Image (tube, rainbow, N blue to C red):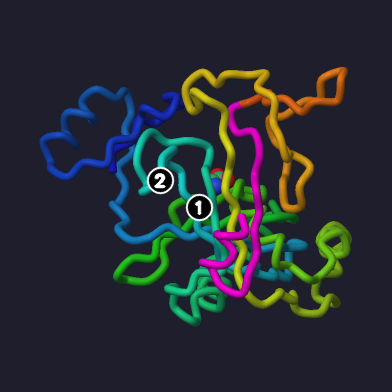
Amino acid sequence: VVKDDGLAAGKGVVVADDGTAALAHAAACDRVVIEEYLDGPEVSLFGITDGTTVYPMQPAQDFKRIFDGDEGPNTGGMGAYTPLPWAPADLVEEVLRDVLQPTVDELARRGTPFTGLLYAGLAITANGPEVIEFNCRFGDPETQAVLALLRSPLARLLHATATGTLAAEPPLEWAPGAAVTVVVAAEGYPGTPRLGDVIGGADADGVLHAGTRVRDDGAVLSAGGRVLSVVGTGPDLAAARADA
Ligand code: GLY
């Protein structure tokens, strides 16, 4: 994976199948970063931390292409689900032990402690989970699915992370079953979205607003690329998807 070392509006990365393409991209960059290609499904795993204790959340997977069947251009995220029935049973335990906790410990050791939501973007490779990236925020749209199943009170957890008392909180509690979120995007997205379309049903249960606004007469209008996130739950993924 050959990357331009700088901001390149998403065009700086080439995932090359052969050396010629990799060299050609590298030659076009001022400074270049070369990374191992990580093969395998991607997983988002969020850890909430007060800087010492880390509580991992349920893993989720999101889909970034605009069309069904994982086709078309990339977007900010078109849908997500949790849990991951195909993932190794010890995935969360392993990522907590090998990724989240050591990262939080090392940041504290360096005198730059981190408190909040640590988002590990992982690839599940033949050699086990590998980190692609970290974000210090909740992931979108995975969060819509993950929080739909979280039974522990989120505000209480956030308060405990902010006050350094997470270890005193009971382990996170999850509702059984599955959650699926499907993003409703504006016509034209991820290109220039058409704005101002009237949306029906936007006040239904499970509908979360993102790019919407309310007109003077009360009508809800599209006002952004990703307009709504619709969350469904059920005893399994098929049921949750049908619900969404
Ligand atoms: N779902 C990807 C992200 O939030 O960065």
Q: Which residue is mark 2?
A: 68
Considering the numbered disc 2 on the image, is that residue within a helix, a strand or a loop? loop
The count of marks equals 2
Name the side, left or right, on which 179 lies relative to 171.
Answer: left
Instruction: Please name the amino acid that badge 2 sits on.
Output: Asp
User: Pointer 1: what residue?
Assistant: 62
Disc assigned to residue 195: none
* Drawn side of residue 43 relative to residue 119, left or right: left
Taking the magenta stretch, the answer to whether it contains residue 230 is yes
Q: Is residue 210 magenta?
A: no
Question: In terms of secondary structure, where does tag 1 sit?
Answer: strand
> Decide: marks 2, 1 in contact (CB < 8 A)?
no
Image coords of residue 171 (percent x, y): 75, 79
Q: Which mark is first along the chain, 1 or 2?
A: 1
Query: Would the CB of label 1 be found within 8 Å of ligand 1?
Result: yes
Task: Examine the rendered structure and indicate whether residue 64 appears above or below residue 145.
Answer: above
- Residue placed at 64% from the left, 58% from the top? 232
- Say which residue appears at 62% left-offset and 59% top-offset: 243
Identify which residue is drawn at 32% across, 56% down.
38
First to last magenta residue range: 225-244
